[in-house]
Amino acid sequence: MKRRTFAGIGAGVFLLPLAAACGNGDDSGDGGGDGLVVGFAQVGAESAWRTANSESVQAAAEADDRIAELKFVDAQQDQEKQIEAVRNFITQQVDVIVLAPVVETGWTDVLQEAADAGIPVVLADRGIEAADEDLYVTRLGSDFAEEGRKAGQWTVDTFAADPDGVTRILELQGTTGSAPANDRKAGFFEVLDGEGLAYELVDSQSGNFTAEEGKAVMETFITTHGLEGIDLLYAHNDEMGLGAIQAIEEAGYAPGTDIQIIIVDGSKAGFQAGVDGKLNYIVECNPVFGEQLMDVVVAVSEGDEVEKFTPVEEGVFDASQFEAELPNRQF
Ligand code: AHR
């Protein structure tokens, strides 16, 4: 059984020893047959983005004859369930573990266990805190801070010349402690502060990336602050933005007009809301990277050089582009 350790290498290109192979050494994961056995601990099914991501990864694994089996676990947005899934993958001696970490912290012990077992870990989608960077090989996913910067730049471009002077903002954050919530917030305010926009963050709460919680938080915002004089809602994903739009309409306001709205993801439902004039800017977050992930998994199992982080390609869309783009959306 071939085993190797991979802790202790810093950021940048990650190089596995050339002699290294997959976790159980025979490229099968089940002691026989061809192809890799891969364990995938997915966040959950909280959004259209997530469903599309799960489908993309599962379809790519199914179609790829380098992959013998994908063991898929839906952790229902619960870190304990994800840790349990990773431990089960270690017990089953899978060849590669793919983890989409629900939050950034709390991974040291279980990732050390994977390292001790000689099983490489690939992060898909979300990242973890820098202190644990040596405990995974590579991350494939979005540059969430850049997504936040894109939202911030549109905000500056849209409101800098506002004669009222101060742009009043509501923010619906994603899951507390998650990489996209932390980084989308940081990137957004980095640009507002850097560009010197006069703004007031009127309120900012987590809607946990779901439509239900996004709607409930927006109802609370409206009850607490009203909507008069609020310029912008920045929602960290489509579902929360769509939930908020419902709350705004039920309160008798016109989303997209009485209050401008930015969402992140770019699902069909998000674009349709844009076509309907109910929101104003979409920052794309691309979930369809299953085939690319399989290439990374195979490369890692074979000890190839891989970048520490590979961002997926993503765009931005304003109101003039919603209608033309809608038919192109894949989720
Ligand atoms: O980690 C990606 C984020 O997770 C997506 O923006 C969101 O919709 C999902 O829940």
Image: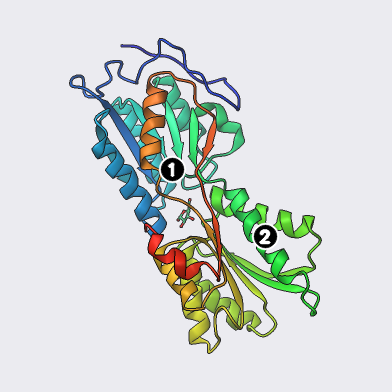
Q: Residue at x 40, y 24 (%)?
A: 299
Q: Is residue 88 visible?
A: no
Q: Residue at x 36, y 26 (%)?
A: 298
* SS class, disc 2: helix
Residue 155 disc label: none
The spot of residue 207 in percent (x, y) is 51, 65
The spot of residue 281 in percent (x, y) is 57, 67
294 or 42, which is in the foreground?
294
Where the C terminus falls, by quadrant? bottom left
Residue 152 disc label: 2
The spot of residue 116 in percent (x, y) is 43, 20
Number of dots carrying numbers = 2
Q: Residue at x 81, y 61 (%)?
A: 196
Q: Is mark 1 within 8 Å of ligand 1?
A: yes
Front position among marks 1 and 2: 2
Q: Is residue 239 left or right of residue 57?
A: right
Colour pattern = rainbow
Marks 1 and 2: CB-CB under 8 Å? Answer: no
175 or 252, which is in the foreground?
252
The spot of residue 316 in percent (x, y) is 56, 58
| Residue marked by disc 1 | 100
Splitting the image into 4 quarters, where does residue 160 fall? bottom right
Farthest-out residue, front: 324
Query: In the image, what residue type sits under mark 1?
Result: Ala
